[in-house]
Image (cartoon, rainbow, N blue to C red):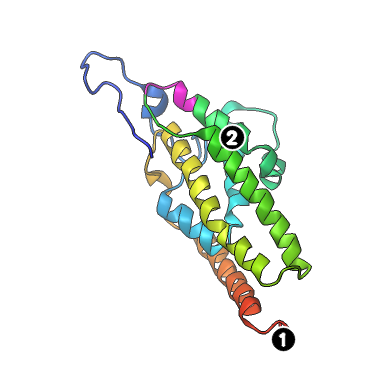
Amino acid sequence: MSSITPPGDTNLYAPPAAEVGDIATPDTAEFYVVASRKFFMLFFVTAGLYQIYWFYRHWAQFKRHHNLDLWPIPRAIFAVFFTHSLTREIEARIHRSTARFDWSPGAIATTFVILQIASNILDRMAWRNIGFPVTDWISISILLPMAWLAHAMQRAANMACGDPEGASNAQLTVANWIWMLLGSILWALALLGLLLPQEIA
């Protein structure tokens, strides 16, 4: 649950909150900004693969914004080691403003990392046909809480960039549709393998 208190509502002479109040463009924002509808569509239709790009964009934006010497790609691939760092940076940005956004960055990051590790273990078990089809179904079901947690981080990032609704990145692009098409094919193959008798699959 989150609440946003716009600065200056009760004091006409209060100084403007430029840190979070100014809406940055998607290219200049400190973090990756995306609307909720677009986020969920890309996350679920790509079977969670979107999170790799999602982490990459957050760190790429952060690197560009601060002109830092860091590698976004490794931080995206090994996201379990950098999720807490990302939520801390988002929280620090929010704290530098006078706006208010209530969330639990540490708890959200920890739970996300635990689920990510569990998902990776289940995927490896599924590939080795261990516990089929239970491991597959559990692995798929984990996508739901992972999406909810990642979305909580995204809402905070949107707020930190002065675009709470992610309006500056709400439209699906051609690349988005291509990735969703590929994701749909992946879903079809995965479900086919789950629904067919094990001997045929």
Of the two numbered discs 1 and 2 on the same chain, state the one appearing first in sequence. 2
Under circle 1, the secondary element is loop
Q: Amino acid at mark 1?
A: Ile
Magenta-drawn segment = 93-98
Q: Is residue 178 above or below residue 75?
A: below
Q: Is residue 92 above or below residue 2?
A: above
Question: Which residue is situated farthest in the right direction here?
Answer: 128
Residue 39 image offset from top left, x and y in percent: 47, 52
Residue highlighted by disc 2: 86
Q: 145 and 68: which one is in front? A: 145
Please rate how many residues cluster around mark 2, counting C-alpha atoms within 10 Å: few if below 14, some from 14 to 19, many from 20.
many
Q: Position of residue 53 (x, y in %)?
A: 60, 50
Secondary structure beneath dot 2 equals helix
Q: Give the image quarter of residue 113.
A: top right
- Please give the count of numbered marks on the rendered protein: 2
Evaluate whether residue 65 shows in this view. Answer: yes
- Answer with the quarter of the image where residue 12 lies: top left
Q: Residue at x 68, y 49 (%)?
A: 117
**Split into 4 quadrants, where in the image is the N terminus?**
top left
Position of residue 149 in the picture relative to residue 163 (left or right): right
| Residue 170 visible | no
Q: Is residue 19 above or below residue 39?
A: above
Q: State yes or no: residue 23 in magenta.
A: no
**What amino acid does circle 2 point to?**
Leu
Q: Which residue is mark 1?
A: 200
Of residues 178 and 36, the one nearer the viewer is 36
